[in-house]
Amino acid sequence: MMSKLKWSHTNAKFGVGCCGQLRVTGSMFFSGHSLDAMVESSAIFKGVEMNGGCLCGAVRYKSDAEPVYQLYCHCRDCQRVSGSASAPIIFFPSQGLSIEGEVTYYESKGSSGKSIYRGFCAKCGSHLFGRLERLPDLLSIRAGTLDDPAAFQPQLHIHASQAAPWEYIDPSLRSFPHDVPQR
Ligand SMILES: [Zn+2]
Ligand SMILES: [Zn+2]
């Protein structure tokens, strides 16, 4: 069953292992709603559906919500975790994103000092999701995991001050030297 993602600090059972790895299984985080409820909610959001998943297929997601931000994050942590120049990211309202499969979350501290949880497939390691303590009503996906990557329509660069010197940055997009601007 595909269930609605429901992040809950109070309900989640975190197991923190070595290296600060935060391991949670889907059922701890995602509860409650049926696929029917998700279809109903799409009538509210009137968004474009975006589907995607990891390399091995064990984790799949589906969003029926309008994206809030579509951006490239150039921070050093996104560079490290992706092994790439930057992370192409789409933020959705968290209630609009449904996830199935086992996702492991790794917690680190962002530039604000608050936690960032990056979610990856427990089997193949593909990085798929991001959750910011600072923006608790949003959840992000990595645009490279979309079934149709052309659905990504980047609008912003953030943490551009940390961009690698060998990266090309599209000058037609708004660029912020540090964090995502407050809504
Ligand atoms: Zn996988
Ligand atoms: Zn980043």
Image (cartoon, rainbow, N blue to C red):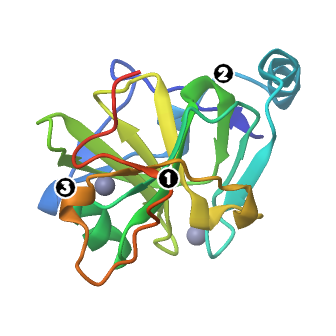
Residue highlighted by disc 2? 32
Name the image quarter holding the N terminus. top right
Give the quarter the ligand 1 occupies.
Answer: bottom right
Residue highlighted by disc 3? 17
Residue highlighted by disc 1? 89
Camera-side residue of 159 and 115: 159
- Amino acid at dot 1: Ile
Left-right relation of 91 to 58: left
The x, y position of residue 21, in whole percent, is: 23, 56
- Amino acid at dot 3: Gly
Element at label 2? loop
Element at label 1? strand
Disc 2 versus disc 1: distance between alpha carbons?
26 Å
Q: Note whether ligand 2 is within 8 Å of mark 1.
A: yes
Left-right relation of 36 to 153: right
Estimate how packed mark 1 is, as few (under 14), some (14 to 19) or many (20 or more) residues with alpha carbons within 10 Å.
many
Q: Residue at x 23, y 79 (%)?
A: 165
Estimate how packed mark 3 is, as few (under 14), some (14 to 19) or many (20 or more) residues with alpha carbons within 10 Å.
few
In the depicted structure, whether residue 58 falls above or below residue 109: below
Q: Residue at x 59, y 67 (%)?
A: 144
Looking at marks 1 and 3 on the same chain, the residue that comes earlier in the sequence is marked by: 3
Front label number (2 vs 1):
1
The x, y position of residue 177, in whole percent, is: 23, 49
The x, y position of residue 76, in whole percent, is: 21, 64
Element at label 3? loop
Disc 3 versus disc 2: distance between alpha carbons?
27 Å
Front label number (1 vs 3):
1
Camera-side residue of 79 and 70: 70
Left-right relation of 153 to 40: left
